[in-house]
Amino acid sequence: MSVVSTGDVSEKTLQTSDLIYKYMRPEHLPQIWCPGCGNGTIMRDVVQAIDNLGLSRDKTVIVSGIGCSSRAAGYMDFDTIHTTHGRAIAFATGIKLANPELEVIVIAGDGDISAIGGNHLIHAARRNIGITVVVMNNNIYGMTGGQYSPTTPTGDYGTTAPYGNLDRSFDIAGLAYGAGASYAARGSVYHVRETIQLIQDGIRNIGFSIIDVASICPTYYGRKNKKGSAVDMLKWQKENAVTMEQAARMTDEQKKGKLIIGVLRQAQYPEFTYQYARLIARLAKEREE
Amino acid sequence: MGMTKELIINSAWCKGCGICAAFCPKGALEIVNEKVRRKEGTDCILCGMCELRCPDYAIYIESKREESEQWVKSY
C-alpha cells in the first residue's frame, strides 16, 4: 500500500484505528516484529500516553538505537531518529540540550540500553536530563538471533549460553534508580493500562525518567527457555506480577521469580537543561557587569 | 443520537498470535487459519481489551456518529 498518512483522521483511508492513523506511519505497517512480540503493544502504549497528554507531534522527538526495539522510530510518525547501537541517549541528550522545549522520548531494548549503552544510561540518569526512556525489555538480543543480554536471568538459555547463563541479570529500573534518575518505574506488556499511566507520568516528570517495560520474545527467549507461546508468556506476567507495595511486604525468598511492577522512585532533582540555561544567563550577566 | 461502536478486524495485519482471543473477557474471538475472527454465538461487549493488547493493531473499536446525526449535521 502506498497511501501516505497525513495524520488527519478525517482523511483516513486505511483500515486502522484513529490512534494508529494519527501517530504512526500506517503505510509501513504491519510491522516486521514476530507474531506475539510485545514490542508492538509497548509502542502503542507510548502513543496512547502521548495522546492522553495531548503532546504536539511537532514538539515530540522519538529516538531509537539498534535492535528489534529500534524499529519503533520508523513506525512512529513524529520527528524520529534511528541512531547507532547504544547511543540513543547520547543523541537524545544533544537534541534536548539544543532545544529544551522538545519532549524527547527514547525507545530502546535491554541490550541497547544496558549493555552497549549502559554508560550513557547511568550518566544521563546522574545528570538528570529531562528525557524519557522507554525500555522494551525482552531479556534477549532478538534481532541478531537470541544471544543472552544483561537482563537474561541467571541459568536461562540463549544461543551464546547453550548451558545456561552464568551472569546475574541487571534490573534496569533499579540501575537507573541507583544512578540517580528522578523517575524510575517498571511496567509489563500484560499490564497495558498501568504501563500507559507509568509512561504518562514519566513524560510529565521534569527530569530523567525511565520506564522499564517487561516485553515478551516468544521467538528466541521463549523458545530457548521453553516458555511456551506468546499467550503463555503473557499469562506468566499476569500470574507472577506483584506491585511495589506488595513487594515491600515480601521476603527476598518470596520475591524470587516475581515481576515487580510500579514506581521505584518519583522525586524532584534539578534538571540539567534548566541548570545549564541558568548558568549561561549568570555568566552573561557577569560579563555585562 | 450519540455514537455507535463497532469491532473492526483488519485481517491483512493479523499475524494470528492469539493474544486477543486468549484475553477476550467474553471469549468472543477465535483464530482460524492464523487469522482472528468473531466466534459465532458469542457476545462482543466492545470493551476494547483486544485493541489494547493486539501487538499488530489488527483489531480495534471504531466509534461512528449515527447516520441520523450525520444527516442533521450536514443539513
Image: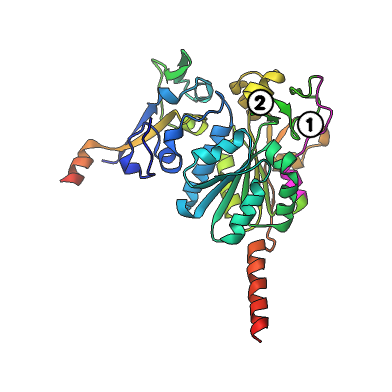
According to the picture, the residue beneath numbered tag 2 turns out to be A236
Q: Secondary structure at mark 2?
A: helix
- Report the front residue among A3 and A187: A3
* First-in-chain label (2 vs 1): 2
Which residue is depicted at the point 61% across and 60% down?
A97
Is A116 placed above or below B53 here? below
Left or right, B39 with reference to B70? right
Q: Amino acid at mark 2?
A: Trp
Which residue is at the far right? Answer: A166
Asked whether B67 falls inside the magenta stretch, the response is no
The part of the chain drawn in magenta is A163-178
Q: Is residue A157 above or below residue A205?
A: above
- Which residue is farthest front? A84
Q: Secondary structure at mark 1?
A: loop
What percent of the width, then of the height, locates residue A266?
67, 53
Extreme-bottom residue of the structure? A289
Q: Quadrant of residue A261?
A: top right
Q: Tag count in the figure?
A: 2
Position in image of residue A30 (x %, y %): 47, 29
How crowded pointer 1 is (Cα within 10 Å; few <14, some 14-19, many 20+) is rated as: few
- On what subunit does the disc labeled 1 rest? A
Query: Left or right: A265 with respect to A68?
Result: right
Q: Amino acid at mark 1?
A: Lys
At x 60%, y 23%, the residue is A230
